[in-house]
Each structure stands twice: as structure tokens, then as C-alpha cells.
Image (tube, helix red, strand yellow):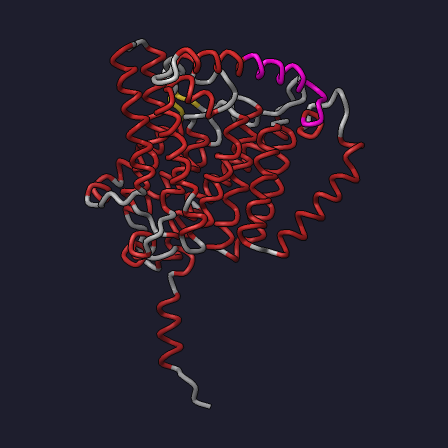
Amino acid sequence: MPALASLRKAHGRRVSWDDLATVVVGLGMALATMPSLMVSNPPLITYSDVALLVGFAMLLPRMLAGRVHASPLYLIGALCLLCISLIWLAVAPYSVQVQGILRLTYAVVVLPCAIMLWRPSVGRIAVLAGFYVAGTTISVLYGAAYGHPADGRNLGLTLHPNGLGHTAMLAVALLPFLVGVLPAARFAALFAGVVCTYGIWISGSRGSLIALALVALVYVLRERSATAALFAWGGFTVLVLVLPRLVSDTSNNVLSRAAGGGSSSDATGQRLLALHDSLHEIHEHPLLGNGFGTIRAAQDAYVQVFAALGIFGLIGFILVLTALALPLFTAKAPLRLIAYAAVGYALLAPFTDSTSDTMVWAALALCMGARDSTEAGQATGATDSSALAVNASGSTAARATSSSPRR
């Protein structure tokens, strides 16, 4: 198995139990991008959920020995969401409510906290991110080869075309981190980036396109990269020049839908109607919301959480996302680069109903690894076989010291 072979090569020794657990969790990350592969529905249980839970169960002794090292913003936000969820569970314990509470708790609390307690090294986080990108690439290629829906929008191995667009956008957002940790993988990252961008194209997801453009803008401004700015400007120029040939009233590619063609007018009308209903629910129940029965109604994650869980739930949700995205501005490279995934989702949230899907939160949970503290973020790597791609650096440095200049 290539993943096991790379782990063996990186460590220079036998594959450990932690290595096997990393591969199992990584498999869960890859399957998270393929929610159509499920065990049951209802209750919704995907093969990704199974693999992630098995992988974290394998790591349980290590996690129990770890310390809670999370941002106060995350802890306060998660506590708000849990408290409101428990109130609704006590008030109206019907099946839809219970499933909504379990999915939200699993996505927003269990997955990030598992990464936090595991405290994987930078190299292991890169392996998990690589699995997510690889899974998205497979989903897009599968959709391109076998998915030919009547409306022209492709869903790959997800359950909806928007799901394909969302996973593709998050995969692209993870690429700067992967290249930062593993520069030798830049050509593979370039291939994955092209495939995932094509995935957004065939999905017709306008929200994913907008989020990708905004993430690119944030990247240019934050990294102050002249090369990235040049590529962005060049791509924008080419897009403007060829736009008339790519857009038509009957096509459902992402640019046609963004320009108002295809099925976009119907979708926009449905979104506005759902938004109106959710705003009415917010007006009626501003403090505790209206419960999980309408958690996906508004096609806007922030409005949906407000309508379902009230103002305190919305505050908690925003605090969690802020905690996951903030390391982009506070942590050190390359680890901080993984926070682009959280930034991407925060920008996507106004255009999606996906609030507690594993396909989103599997990527966001990795952002818990981007901590400010060197002790928390990187010292683990020293005892955890170090970063997988640079295992030999210690011996290289020793040889360089012992063979100091004889000229």
C-alpha cells in the first residue's frame, strides 16, 4: 500500500501502531469527500464516519494521555452549541431532532477535539490533508467519467452537485499547506488543483466559485505573493476574454449559472423563499431558535444556525469558525496555511446549507492542528517520528557537522 510504504520509508523502521491509525483516519478523510458511499440513511452513517471512528479508537490511549489545548474561542463556541442542543433534546426529543444534534455534535465537537487530543505532527496532518485532496480528486474524476446528469450538473461521489463543489473548494484551500510541508509534491498538488477546479466547474456550484475566488484573494493579500497575484490576474484576464464562449442560457456550468443562465433562476427563487421563511422563524424565536427540523432550510449556514439554535447558537458557531481560521494570522508557517480551509468555509457558509456534514468538517477539523504554541504544534513531531517528509534531517545535520570544511 503506497501510504504504508511512504510511512515506512519516512521513519526508517517498522510501521508503528500510530502509523496504521494515521492511515485509517486518512482513509476516513478521503471517504468524507464521497458521502454517497454510506452504510445507512436514516440514520445517516457513511463509510467515512466508520473509518474515522475506528482510527480515533485506535488512537484513544494516546488521546486520553493528552491535554486539552484549544483556543478559548473554540471552547466557548462549542459549549454554546452543546448547551443549546441539549436544551432542544430535552424539549423536543423526536428523531429528526436527535439526528441533527448527533450530527452537529459529531462534526463541530468530536472531530476537532479528536485532532486536538491526538496532537499529530505537521507531517501527519499533511498526510491527512493529502488523503482529503486525493479523495476529492477521485470523486471529480469519477464524476467526469461516469456522471452525466440530465441537468448538466455533476455530483461526483457526493449526494448533490453543491457537495462536489464544496469538497473541491476545500481541497484547493488545503493545497498551500501541502506544498508548504512537502515542496517535492508541488507537481502532484498542481494536478490536484486543476482537477478540483474542474470539479467546481462541472458542479455548477456558484457558492464554491465565489468562495474559491475570495480565498485566492485572501491568499494574495496574506502571503503578499507576487507570483500568486500574477497568476490570479492572468487567470482573471483569460476568463474575461473567453467568458462569452463559456456562458450560455442553457448551460449549467458554474459560470453560466453565476451569470444567471441554466437552472440558476429557479434555484435563486427557491433560496430567496427559504431565506424569507428562516428570517420569519428568527423573528418568532430569536433566543433558542426553532429546532433542528429546519436546520438546512435557508441555504445559508449562518441564517440556518440562527433559525434553528437562536442567537446563542449562532454566536457559538461563529466563535468555532473564528477559532479555526484565526491561526492563519497568528501561527507560524507552514502549519498556519492549513487554516485556509476554515477561511474557505467561513466564506462559503452564506451560500451553503452544509452545517454539519462530514465532507466539510473532516477538512475543518484538521485546522485544530494549527496552534500558536511551538510546544503544542511542533514538539509533538519530535516524539511522534517528526514530520514524515523530513525524517532524515537530523542524520543529515549530524553528517554535515562531522564533515565540516576541510578545505
Closest to the observer, 352 or 253:
352
Image vertical order of residue 19 relative to residue 169, above or below: below
* Residue at the image position 36 percent from the left and 14 percent from the top: 291
Image coordinates for residue 254, horizontal then vertical, percent: 66, 29
Query: Is residue 67 located in the magenta-colored stretch of the structure?
Result: no
As drawn, which residue projects farthest toward the bottom? 407
Image vertical order of residue 175 relative to residue 299, above or below: below
Closest to the observer, 114 or 86:
86
Query: Is residue 271 located in the magenta-colored stretch of the structure?
Result: yes
| Left or right: 178, with 40 as reference point | right
The secondary structure that most of the magenta stretch takes on is helix
**Quadrant housing residue 244:** top right
Closest to the observer, 2 or 283:
283
* Residue at the image position 76 percent from the left and 31 percent from the top: 246
Closest to the observer, 76 or 267:
76
- Residue interval drawn in magenta: 258-273
Image coordinates for residue 321, horizontal then vertical, percent: 41, 36
- Quadrant of the image for the N terminus? top left
**Quadrant housing residue 139:** top right
Image vertical order of residue 217 relative to residue 382, above or below: above
| Left or right: 55, with 27 as reference point | left
